[in-house]
Amino acid sequence: MVIESKALTIEMLRLRQLQRTEPLRPKTAAVPQTSQPGAPNFADVLQDMLSTPDIIFSAHAVSRLIDRNITLNQEQIDRIRGGVGKAEAKGANDSLVLLNDLAFVVSIKNHTVITAMSGPGLKDNVFTNIDSAVIV
């Protein structure tokens, strides 16, 4: 038991350290040197980056991700980030962001994921203290 909880603690510390040193930013496509029809220009790429907020995961959310064996890839993080941006544009404060069989309660004002749930944990659950829901 001690080894297992120590491993979880080490993993949580590693995730927190990554979060501090590597802000979760969307990966942007390189802007082509020559203008091609339909290719994004610099202004469009810059505006997209500025309109998509960074998100952070609270210690509680990191703990829930580990406890529930939830791993997120960059594409999923980008989708959550996009959902936060949409909720913010609509004036939301606290939102439920649904991503496939995952649910995240997010403080829109702080761009902070408060908690995370996966498939089995979603059944017969009531989400409180939210003012919006975003399906991404």
Image (tube, rainbow, N blue to C red):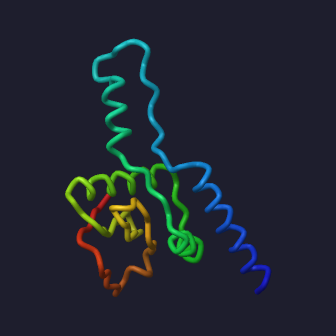
Picture coordinates of residue 82, whole percent (x, y): 34, 51
Picture coordinates of residue 119, whole percent (x, y): 43, 75
Give the mark count.
0
Q: Is residue 81 above or below residue 64?
A: above
Horizontally, residue 113 falls left or right of residue 69, namely left
Q: Residue drawn 45% across and 35% down?
A: 28
Q: Residue drawn 21% across and 60% down?
A: 91
Horizontally, residue 13 falls left or right of residue 106, namely right
Quadrant into which the N terminus falls: bottom right
Horizontally, residue 8 falls left or right of residue 96, namely right
Picture coordinates of residue 41, whole percent (x, y): 33, 23
For this orientation, the residue located farthest to the top is: 34
Tell me where residue 39 sits by quadrant.
top left
Tell me where residue 16 sits by quadrant.
bottom right
Q: Residue drawn 34% across and 87% down?
A: 124
Horizontally, residue 47 falls left or right of residue 11, namely left
